[in-house]
Amino acid sequence: MTGRFDHLPNRRAIVDRRAVADTIAALDENDPVALGRQATILLKAALDAGRVEVAKRLAEHPSRGLEVSSAQAYLIDQLLRLLFDFTTTRLHPAPAPTPDDRLTLIAVGGYGRGEMAPHSDVDIGFLTPGKQTPRVERIIESMLYTLWDLGLKLGQSSRSLDEMIRQAKADITVRTALLEARYVTGDMDLYEEASRRFKVEVQADTARAFIADKLVERDLRHRKMGDTRYVVEPNVKEGKGGLRDLHALFWIGKYIYDVQRAAQLVDVGLFTKAEYRLFHRADNFFQAVRCHLHSITGRAEDRLTFDVQREIADRMRFSDRPGKPKVERFMHFYFLQAKTVGDLTGVFLAHLDEKFAARGRRFGLPTIRRSPRRLNGFVLDRGRLALPDDDFFRAEPVRLIEIFQLADRNTLEIHPLAMRAAARDVKLVDDIRDDPTANALFLDVLSSPRDPELVLRWMNETGVFGRFVPDFGRVVAQMQFDMYHHYTVDEHTIRALGLLARIENGALKDDHPLASAIFRQIVSRRVLYVAVLLHDIAKGRGGDHSILGAEVAQRLCPRFGLSPAETETVAWLVRWHLLMSATAFKRDLSDFKTILDFCDVVQSPERLRLLLVLTIVDIRAVGPGVWNGWKRQLLGDLYESAEEVLRLGHKQKGRAERIAAKHETLHADLGWSDAEFAAFVRRMPEAYWIAEPEDVLVHNARFLAGTGDAQLAIDAHVYPGRGATLVTIYAADHPGLFYRIAGAIHVAGGNIIDARIHTTRDGMAVDNFLVQDPFGRPFDGSEQLARLKTAIEDALANRGKLADRLVAKPLPRARAEAFDIVPNAMIDNRASNRFTVVEVNARDGPALLNRLAQALFQSKVTIHSAHVATYGERAVDTFYITDLTGDRITAPARLKTLERRLLAAAAGKQLDLAA
């Protein structure tokens, strides 16, 4: 053995190889098949017992990831040696083996490194001196069948020495796996010959190409995983800042210097002792997390999803703190380790760059200048901003901010060794926080018209950002334990600032035409940049982060150099940064009271412009797929209505004028006779003309004109402006119609995001629903639409029991069950002059809207509109209702009963129909 596992305590408790070998040797069976079966049973018992012992060690010492992963590899080693000896001596003995019969079994990949989680693949290789002899073929075949019978997932290869060299030269993946090859059992001379030939024929003089290939491979992997280490459901193995990035550093060091252990990277100068300790700590932690992941899920799972994060936090003995539950503390530590891996990678590659610089271009970027050039005392080292000496920051701490400002202003990369020096000297920032020059430089970076996201990310990586703005430091690597936010708070904020710069420079004008157009009208752009920086600054403090954040803004803005007026505006934006989205997505924008209430808070066109842009970047920076056409349309509608009120002091056209204008436009679009159009207008209630936009009015009119005397007609078509499908149902109005339609749409696989309910003067319902699939896309496939229409027809005709079909419909995102959400129902008679507004917050689940609508039906109320917003696992459903006579509901007893029914429905409980 190589001594790889000498550090493991009490190895015989994992597996006593000698005892198992003696038991196998005592097997008295002449039939090879029966003998193999009996040996397999003994090996399986040893494997199961060993796994129990490894699991026990993980439970007793839940943070010793490297020790547990080594124990798992040690167990597999011993079983392979037992199986190899048994197969070569009992199943396929050779009294006089020839030199061609030589066979070596090696461990490769992660197993070769001696690191395995409970369900990791067992990566092995069989090596022969030349073409396999019949005996060797039988040995390999027998071993593989036995290993499969043991339930092991194998990654295996069988190669001659010449094949090994040829494939290693041709394939970087094979070369990397063989780089970590480790002798397990078999012919030692053959292994040593293979090792020698690999070094001489594959490794020699190919270091630069190997490094370049591994970096390209790393970049592709990062892009596939989202290209950030701060996703809230990270991949422990493949994600940015995870185990694979650590492995890449070790592979490169091993390829160049032939080190056998990561600790030897210090000896060859690629890490300092302090940096290696950080490397070891991150490696140990990630290995522990991965082992727990495999143990909990019972499979080779590397994605740290919400439903396991809480259990791993428990297992690893994290505890709750005021305002911060244990799961968020665990994930905070996770992201700090991922950040450490990123820092170490930069330093490591800087060392390599220096070593290989004399041979030509450096990794990733072309050589710009050979000789250093001065820039405000800094030097340019081959196009990167570098330090002239090691004490440069200590001599003048303001340079810790200036280096980032110069990098931004001159579009330069910062040398990794300068980044390392900044991280080392970061405490010096404490002395310059109140320095006007330092704050002016910081504000220059923050509101840069170039690429503030990139430079602020560098500043965050070194720790300078969080040290200079300690309130920001409190949210670095802080996750929010929900399914809505995809990134940590600091990553979300930096992404939002990047989006803001791209909207300003016109790069996103196709996605955000309104925001791009009004940006030129914004008077104080730096107010907006500071507000984006501070909008989530107070998250994790145990209170309303909007209110607490406004207090932070009042304190920080003067320090940054903002005037009292600018400070007031920033604080207002932080305080109300959720107002516009809450109004647009959860309120009825056709109700003029909604617009007036919104304008009472906003009060000025400049604030409205600032708030719109802040709202857009805040939503988009939440994560991929969160922004869509529906949200763009609603925010645009709210902006235009509010802008008209704020500019003119009132709506340009009153209710009657607005209806008349819509009549005139619709009449022109339809081309109907005056009599036909007048008859149609008389059928529709006044609220219909206010609530629906002009394109929906046109579509509804043509649809209704074609229904004739039908008592039920259904139309569905994609509504591109809102990224959804408009489903219109024309049916005889009756109590419970809405909840039946809502249930049917869910049964068909659709999600309702908005609904308008109208009743014609002759008793027919005209209901417009906006529907998406579970992934936020239009519900537009021909099969989907056919299924939708059939489900609605069946529900309204009482064909089949709708409740049973809803129960059978599974929740599309079962991970929502990982979150504790207490349902909440709020009933408001002040939000509208005509309706009682009901808002229900609950966990998003099967047919939630259907259950709530049924509770309203049982409460004998009329639903006039419904608005659905989802935030990950949380749903917010808002209804505008009246009693059956068209009045608001004001009786306290009735309101209390309504609230109780809604809470029961939100919790999925049986409705109390007797109350």
Image (spheres, rainbow, N blue to C red):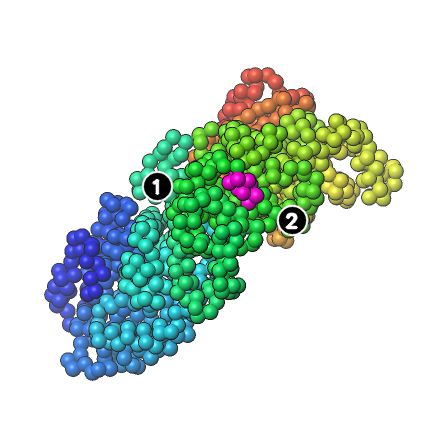
| Residue type for callout 1 | Ala
Q: Quadrant of the N terminus?
A: bottom left
* Residue nearest the observer in this picture, 727 or 370: 370
Q: State the CA–CA distance, disc 2 to disc 1.
A: 43 Å
Kind of element beneath mark 1: helix
> Does any portion of residue 528 appear in the rendered image?
yes
Q: Is residue 520 left or right of residue 534?
A: right
Q: Residue at 55%, 25% (x, y): give it.
A: 826
* Residue nearest the observer in this picture, 685 or 455: 455
Q: Is residue 464 left or right of residue 72?
A: right
| Position in image of residue 644 (x %, y %) | 74, 32
Is residue 441 in the magenta section?
Answer: yes
Q: Is residue 287 left or right of residue 701?
A: left
| Residue type for callout 2 | Asn
| Position in image of residue 176 (x %, y %) | 37, 67
* Residue nearest the observer in this picture, 647 or 79: 647
Q: Residue at 68%, 22% (x, y): give it.
A: 833
User: Residue beneath label 1, please?
Assistant: 313
Residue 114 falls in image quadrant? bottom left
Secondary structure predominantly adopted by residues drawn in magenta: helix
Kind of element beneath mark 2: loop
Is residue 518 in the magenta section?
Answer: no
Q: Residue at 45%, 53% (x, y): give it.
A: 387
> Which span of residues is magenta-colored?
437-446
